Amino acid sequence: MGMDAGGSRGGVKANINVTPLVDVVLVLLIIFMVVTPMLQRGKDVLLPTAKKQKKETKSATDPLILSVTKEKNVYVEQDLYSEDAKLEERLSNEFVNTPGKRLLLKADQSLTFADVRHVMSVAKKAGAKGIALGVDEKAQGGE
């Protein structure tokens, strides 16, 4: 129990019961473990590494995530597009509805330049003003 009445000196002893605290902490840990993977946008791809990256200026709107997996599947956010015409239509709708929308292309590092260039040309036809390429930052020693 939380309190023990009596004792060797006859006073009241107050003991802290940590069991409810541990229960709450474990529940919060489980909630964070479940929610964190859902915060990632786009599909999982193994990005190429870059030695130096240009500092990106913050924009008011989030970019549209275009992912290309190693199986050459193309996703806009979480939606799969197997045909170029449907991909172009989706992208053009996004650019018409949100003028100035930025596009972030995440392509798996195992893809060839031709595969990535093909997706970039479809995005350009759809009206993309510019395409940012997603890369992993490579740790630099001594810089």
Image (cartoon, helix red, strand yellow):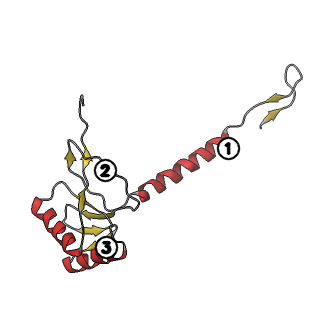
Mark 1 — residue?
Answer: 20
Apparent side of residue 136 relative to residue 112 in the rendered image (left or right): right
Image: 39 above or below 53: below
Q: Earlier in the sequence, mark 1 or mark 3?
A: 1
Residue situated furthest top in the rendering: 9
The three-letter code of the residue at mark 3 reads Phe
Q: Quadrant of the N terminus?
A: top right
Q: Secondary structure at mark 1?
A: helix
**Which residue does the image show at 19% across and 60% down from the upper left?**
70
Disc 3 marks which residue? 95
Question: Relative to residue 104, is residue 24 depicted above or below?
Answer: above
If you read the primary sequence from the N terminus, does the residue marked by circle 3 or circle 2 appear first? Answer: 2
For the residue pair 61 and 33, the one nearer the viewer reads as 61
Q: Residue at x 85, y 24 (%)?
A: 7
Q: Position of residue 106 (x, y in %)?
A: 25, 59
Label 1 and label 2: CA atoms lie apart by 45 Å
Amino acid type at image mark 2: Glu
Residue at numbered disc 2 = 56
